[in-house]
Image (cartoon, helix red, strand yellow):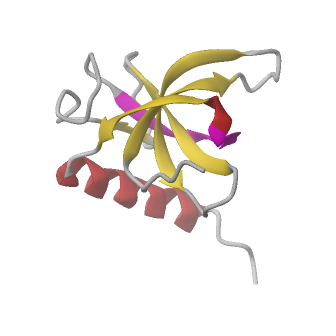
């Protein structure tokens, strides 16, 4: 079985939220627990300016073909069999920004006591 590291960029059939299909696109691996699924975040070349979009400064070194952003509020658990290939890996500064944005996302959703 394929094994991925957090920060890997992959090309996969990313499912639409409406469950009506999928689009082949790059995604950022957030978690691989060793089973048949991955937790990924969508990567897009379209400009979006939400607190949960991280613009990648070293997109070419990471294996992407165009300036891109990670949309961290667009996560999905996908089967590894949907991965077409590994594209590359985020550079340390971009990975640090992604981790900081993830901390911000999850700190907002703390359950009430």
Secondary structure of the magenta portion, mostly?
strand
Quadrant assignment for the C terminus? bottom right
Q: Residue at x 45, y 34 (%)?
A: 10
| Residue visible at 56% across and 27% down in the picture | 12
Q: Position of residue 67 (x, y in %)?
A: 25, 21
Instruction: Answer with left or right where residue 88 lies relative to residue 13.
Output: left
What range of the chain is rendered magenta? 69-80
Q: 101 or 7, which lies in front?
A: 7
- How many numbered badges does the structure rendering display? 0
Image quarter for residue 53? top left
Residue sitting nearer the eye, 81 or 64: 81
Picture coordinates of residue 34, whole percent (x, y): 61, 62
Position of 61 compared to 101: left or right? left
Q: Report whether 58 appears left or right of 63.
A: left
Residue drawn at x 19%, y 27% as measured from the top left: 60
Which residue lies most toward the bottom here? 113
The residue lying toward the viewer, choosing from 8 and 54, is 8
Q: Position of residue 86 (x, y in %)?
A: 41, 34
Q: Quadrant of residue 66?
A: top left
- Tell me which residue sits at (56%, 57%) in the image: 32
Answer whether residue 11 is magenta in the image.
no
Q: Position of residue 46 (x, y in %)?
A: 40, 15
Closer-to-camera residue (85/90): 85
* 84 to 95, vertically: above or below: above
Q: Is residue 64 above or below residue 110?
A: above
Figure check: 113 above or below 13: below
In which quarter of the view is residue 100 placed? bottom left
């Amino acid at each position: 079985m394929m094994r991925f590291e957090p920060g890997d960029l992959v090309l996969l059939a990313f499912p639409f939220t409406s469950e009506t299909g999928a689009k082949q696109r790059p995604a950022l691996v957030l978690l691989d627990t060793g089973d048949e699924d991955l937790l990924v975040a969508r990567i897009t070349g379209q400009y979006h300016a939400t607190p949960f979009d991280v613009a990648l400064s070293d997109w070419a070194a990471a294996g992407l073909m165009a300036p891109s952003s990670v949309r961290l509020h667009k996560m999905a658990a996908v089967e590894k069999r949907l991965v077409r290939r590994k594209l590359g890996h985020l550079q340390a500064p971009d990975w640090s920004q992604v981790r900081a944005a993830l901390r911000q996302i999850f700190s907002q959703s703390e359950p009430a006591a």
